[in-house]
Image: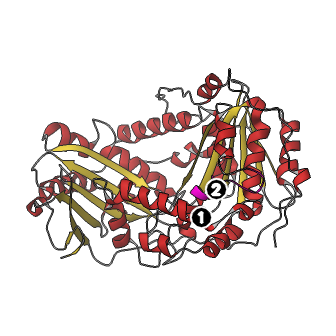
Amino acid sequence: MRTRAPLRDHRPSWSPPRRQGTFWLVSLAMIGCVVMATSTAFPAQTKVKFDQYKLDNGMTIILHEDHSAPVTAVVVMYNVGSRSEKVKRTGFAHLFEHMMFQGSQHVADDEHFKLLQEVGANINGSTSNDRTNYYEVVPSNYLELALYLESDRMGFLLPAMTQEKLDNQRDVVKNERRQNYDNQPYGTAWEKIAKALYPETHPYSWPTIGYMEDLSAASLEDVKEFFRIYYAPNNAVLSIAGDFRPAQAKAWVKKYFGSLGRGTEIPRPKPMPVTLAEEKRLVFEDKVQLPRLYMQWPSPQMFTRDDAVLDVLADILGSGKNSRIYKALVYDKKVAQSVNVYQGSQLLASQFSVEVTAKPDKSLTEMETLVNEEIGKLLKEGVTQKEVQTSINNREMSVTNSLSTVLGKANQLATYFVMTGNPSDINKELDRYKGITPSEVLAVAKKVLGGKKVALSVVPEGKRELAAEQKTLERKGGVE
């Protein structure tokens, strides 16, 4: 049983918040700098210095000082996502993200947002397959406020959780699903792909937002049990980056988080790569103007060597005007509106994706034929050293930009801890791409793109003839 800190030890000591003179400070924290890629064979990565330690309850703390602006970012990341859910109990992780903003035992229902907004804070949370994070970027003199609020909902959420709040946020999430998925052009494409790509029991086979019927079936006790298991200090990392004094920050961390009780140990899922025995082809009629083709290949999980090589391959095929598929379909033949190619890296398994949005009334069979031609040419002729180097240069720019704000650094430090167990991997991201050669890119391309895939055609309603090789037709409202 997790113990709770007595209220008298949990009250903050900051002065009442004042609005004036704070909003510009937060905007400084969000300013990014664009750094031009270098022309060296392999770029050097700027090192992020940090201090890491653990509380007695197992909670990991990461501190990074950055006094360039009077702002501080606080990120609390829990090692829980939709991969932690079960069949018929989907959507809990995302639903809980909403519940965490509904007030706790010592913070009234509307106070969490109100207290932070009054000091000009930037506040949000997000849920993925693999983690859930909450963050605040505050003027540095309000760091204690951010820590107090995060600790109170970590340690004292359940006493304030009611059936009314659950019903309210369940309806909010359902509306979010309707707006962003069910009634959004192409909105359910990924849901259909995941069901085809992964077995039914694989935790990536359902969407992060969950299914309507599962959200409806969630009881108050179900949700409370989810919190007891996953929202414990030993399943969380607190990352603080920005303008603060370490001694003071550590004192506040101990004050607000130190007395929270440890939860049960949670077994971590091992990688669950998938293979397809046969190609799967789906066609979905949707309220869209332009047909779109999704091609998905199972690929190695995050942080493997092949994962990094596939990042490079994706750049060569579809990143920028001179990339192979983009140039051929958008610029040369002018048959496609857009092309997007990427390695969808995830903790348990990944997928390599090619997405092509066709010009009006262009057939997706033509899109697939042209994509296959470019892939076939690459598999036959290989790639060049210049293409590999261009991708690596782009990686340097991406890594640098991701660390150009205090929020970026706090979030990346927490992410590496959750994903790899070692936040120092933040300083080794570019090392993953060291030594990648054209022959290695070719070998990995043959291994992944030579396998079976899922191909989904999303076409305007009534225009099935635009789909790529209609073997299976799924229409809105059912399978035909």
Q: Label 1 is placed on what type of residue?
A: Glu
Q: How is the image coloured?
A: secondary structure
Mark 2 nearby-residue class (10 Å; few <14, some 14–19, many ≥20): some
> In the drawing, does residue 193 fall left or right of residue 266?
left
Can residue 447 be seen?
A: no
Q: Earlier in the sequence, mark 1 or mark 2?
A: 2
The label shown at residue 271 is none
Q: Quadrant of residue 444?
A: bottom left
Q: Residue furthest front?
A: 164
Q: Label 2 is placed on what type of residue?
A: Met
In front: label 1 or label 2: 1
Mark 1 nearby-residue class (10 Å; few <14, some 14–19, many ≥20): few
The picture places residue 302, in percent across and down from the top left corner, at 52, 58
The secondary structure that most of the magenta stretch takes on is loop
The picture places residue 212, in percent across and down from the top left corner, at 42, 69
The picture places residue 247, in percent across and down from the top left corner, at 88, 37
Choose between 354 and 132: the one closer to the eye: 132
In the picture, the quarter occupied by the N terminus is bottom right
Q: Start and end of the magenta stretch?
A: 98-107
> In the drawing, does residue 234 fall left or right of residue 177?
right
State the residue at coordinates (65%, 65%): 162
Q: Which residue is mark 1?
A: 164
The picture places residue 277, in percent across and down from the top left corner, at 32, 78
Can residue 450 be seen?
A: yes
Q: Quadrant of residue 331?
A: top left
Choose between 457 and 91: the one closer to the eye: 91
Secondary element under disc 2, as helix, strand or loop, is loop
> Does residue 88 belong to the magenta stretch?
no
Relative to 287, residue 317 above or below = above
Q: Which residue is mark 2?
A: 100
* Mark 1–mark 2 distance (CA, rounded to whole Å): 14 Å
